[in-house]
Image (cartoon, rainbow, N blue to C red):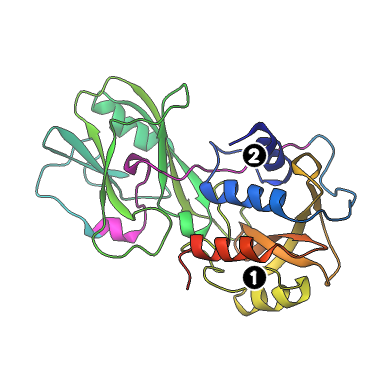
Amino acid sequence: MTHDVDRVVAAIAPDPGPGLVPGAHDLMREIMDSSPAPALQPTVESGRRRRMGWRIAVPAVAVLAASVTVLGWTSALPVFGPEPVAAALEITQKDGYYVIQVNDLRADPAKYQAQLKALGLDVSLRLVPASPGLVGNLFATTPTNEVVEEFKTIDRPGPCDKVGNCPIGLKIPVGYKGTALVDLNRDAEPGEKYDAFTGFDAKGEPMHCVPYVNKKVGEVRTILAERGLSIEGFATGKSPDDVKEVATVPDSWYVTSGFLVMPGKAKLVAGSEPKPDHLVKMQWRKQGCS
């Protein structure tokens, strides 16, 4: 990830989060690979600098499912923590690990931390609103922003319909003495902006394997409407240092990528020239589409 790409992300992404998803990296590279577009005046308020909000787990440690499927994963081992009946987390011990599941995605994060602290763990868990393909993922880091390699996951068997491996449990070594922050992705409320998101054509997102790249804005608007989505705005620019957030562009412009900013709302990356065919084919293959 180059410093130039970081500046692009800061220019167009929503509220700050803990890092960047691979989809965000791809999105920024796509902007840089696209043909230059006419400069437009930004609509974003002066001085507003933002970062795209998530890092998908490349190591298996980084993700934890937090959907109702978690509730179906059980253990005969006793539950640890101060509130075993109405606990926000279900925590069991097995093979030298605490095995952790989330029972209540709407709990006050202090409840999570209290249960973990009761086990002698200096681990904080916080919830982050995320786009559909990222719900359930988590990322565990140290105070110096390094991945916590000691944490492991248990993945759901069979195919996974989202980004990551659809894990159903997080394992923390018994006696772990480090400090960690765990960011857990949850569904966003209506009208709530995503802090964690990836390209809207990623696995689990509404435009996955939908042939929209290089279609004109007017056509993509129709495709989005068929999926219950509307356009919130656009990102365009001549270079990574010149990416601008704008409210509208001509319907004749070409769409090269996009992402969701909140439930039902998408932001499109568009320009006056189409993306080269070889890059379109590469993007399609990377999404696992045929």
- Residue 89 appears in the rendering: yes
- Name the residue located 26 percent from the left edge and 27 percent from the top edge: 118
Q: Is residue 268 left or right of residue 39?
A: left
| Distance Cα–Cα, label 1 vs label 2 | 23 Å
> Could you say which is closer to the camera, residue 117 or residue 73?
73
> Could you say which is closer to the camera, residue 226 or residue 237?
237
* Residue segment shown in magenta: 48-71
Q: Main secondary structure of the magenta part?
A: loop
Q: Amino acid at mark 2?
A: Arg
Q: Is mark 1 in CB contact (under 8 Å) with mark 2?
A: no
Mark 1 is surrounded, within 10 Å at the Cα level, by few (under 14), some (14 to 19) or many (20 or more) other residues, namely: some
- Name the residue located 43 percent from the left edge and 49 percent from the top edge: 106
Mark 2 is surrounded, within 10 Å at the Cα level, by few (under 14), some (14 to 19) or many (20 or more) other residues, namely: many
Q: Secondary structure at mark 2?
A: loop
Residue 25 location (% of width, % of height):
58, 46
- Name the residue located 86 percent from the left edge and 68 percent from the top edge: 250
* Location of mark 1 (residue): 229
> Could you say which is closer to the camera, residue 199 or residue 280?
280
44 drawn magenta: no
* Location of mark 2 (residue): 51
| First-in-chain label (1 vs 2) | 2
63 drawn magenta: yes
To which quarter of the image does residue 125 belong?
top left
Residue 115 location (% of width, % of height):
29, 33
